Image (cartoon, grey):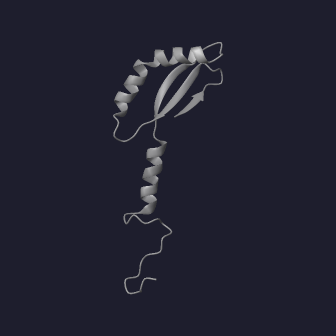
C-alpha cells in the first residue's frame, strides 16, 4: 500500500495492492463504501486541520513487475543471462 498526499493535504490517493485472485472491482467498491470509516479513523489519529479525502486505486506495480519478469525470462523459464545447456557435454 502506498499513499500520495496532495500538496494542500486535502486529498490522499491510496494505492492498494490486490492479488490476482481478488475481484478488483469488488475490492474498490468495498473500500469506497467504507471510505467514511477510514477517514474518521484517520481524523482521530492525525493532528491535521483537515482530514484528507480518500481516493482508492488499485496498485498494479507487483503484477506489472511479475509480468515483466516473465517476459524477460522468455518462454523456457530461464533467466536471460543463463547459458543454454549443451546436450553432448558431460555435467560437472
Q: Position of residue 73 (x, y in %)?
A: 44, 62
Whether residue 28 is situated above or below residue 92 in the rendered picture? above
Count of marks placed on residues: 0
Q: Residue at x 41, y 63 (%)?
A: 74
Q: Residue at x 43, y 66 (%)?
A: 78
Q: Position of residue 58 (x, y in %)?
A: 45, 34
Viewed as shown, does residue 35 lie left or right of 9? left
Q: Residue at x 65, y 24 (%)?
A: 7
Q: Residue at x 33, y 34 (%)?
A: 23
Q: Position of residue 17 (x, y in %)?
A: 46, 37
Viewed as shown, does residue 50 lie left or right of 72? right
Q: Quadrant of residue 11?
A: top right
Q: Quadrant of residue 2?
A: top right
Q: Position of residue 39 (x, y in %)?
A: 52, 17
Q: Nearer the viewer, residue 1 or 57?
A: 1
Residue sticking out furthest to the front? 92
Amino acid at each position: 500500500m502506498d499513499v500520495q498526499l496532495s500538496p494542500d493535504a486535502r486529498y490522499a490517493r491510496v494505492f492498494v495492492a490486490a492479488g490476482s485472485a481478488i475481484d478488483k472491482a469488488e475490492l474498490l467498491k468495498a473500500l469506497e463504501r467504507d471510505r467514511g470509516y477510514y477517514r474518521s479513523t484517520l481524523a482521530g489519529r492525525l493532528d491535521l486541520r483537515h482530514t484528507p479525502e480518500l481516493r482508492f486505486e488499485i496498485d498494479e506495480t507487483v503484477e506489472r513487475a511479475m509480468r515483466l519478469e516473465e517476459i524477460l525470462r522468455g518462454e523456457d523459464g530461464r533467466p536471460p543471462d543463463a547459458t543454454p545447456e549443451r546436450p553432448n557435454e558431460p555435467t560437472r
